[in-house]
Image (cartoon, rainbow, N blue to C red):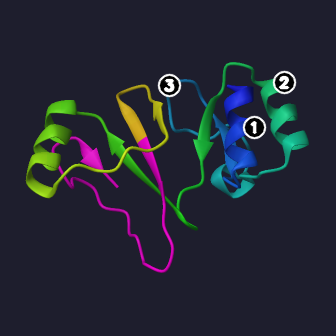
Amino acid sequence: MLDDALRYAARGWRVFPVRARSKRPMTPRGRNDATTEASQIREWWEMWPSAGIGLLAGNGIAVVDIDDEDGFDQFEATHGALPETLGATTGRGRHMFYRYEGVEVRTRIGIGRGVDL
């Protein structure tokens, strides 16, 4: 996980440690502690080597959260296929990461069955 967290940070994506197979932050300020600083990231994963990676979405990064593959297939059948992108396996499914500029992207629950933005 440390190597992946450092790779995300090298892309300019702010990360923070979360409890394994959870979205619960392990740091005192949670998502507000998110950083790209390699030294801080190394320190966190030395303290919590089994931590998952939290990624601060927004600020040019949108995440499609897929917990139901059939629901995602139905979403794409209705709206068209999403472009290939960097992704990650989660405790319940997977995430797809997209960069965006010049538009407002709002969190939306249920854009498809088991699919959130």
Q: Secondary structure at mark 2?
A: helix
Q: Amino acid at mark 3?
A: Arg
**Residue 80, quarter of the rendered image:** bottom left
**Quarter of the figure with residue 66:** top left
Q: How many marks?
A: 3
Which disc is residue 21 wearing? 3
Sequence-earlier tag: 1 or 3:
1
Q: N-terminal of the two: label 1 or label 2?
A: 1
In-front residue for pair 41/33: 41
Residue shown at the point (27%, 55%) measured from the top left: 109
Residue 101 left/right relative to 34: left
Give the residue drawn at x 8%, y 53%.
Answer: 78
The answer to whether residue 92 is left or right of residue 22 is left
Q: Tell me where residue 56 appears, x and y as whole percent.
A: 59, 54
Q: Do callouts 3 and 2 mark residues in contact (Cβ within 8 Å)? A: no
Label 3 crowding class (10 Å Cα cut-off): few <14, some 14-19, many 20+?
few
Compared with 75, 105 (above or below) is below
Part of the protein shown in magenta: 96-117
Camera-side residue: 112 or 86? 86
Q: Amino acid at mark 2?
A: Glu
- Residue 56 to residue 20: above or below: below
Task: Tell which tag, 1 or 3, sits nearer the viewer.
Answer: 1
Position in image of residue 106 (x %, y %): 38, 69
Q: Residue at x 81, y 33 (%)?
A: 44
Instruction: Answer with mark 3 or mark 2, whichever residue precedes in sequence.
Output: 3
- 3D distance between C-alphas at marks 3 and 2: 18 Å
Q: Which mark is residue 46?
A: 2
Q: Which residue is mark 1?
A: 6
Secondary element type, mark 1: helix
- Mark 1 and mark 3 in contact? Answer it, CB < 8 Å: no
Assign the C terminus to one quadrant of the image: bottom left
Q: Residue furthest bottom?
A: 102
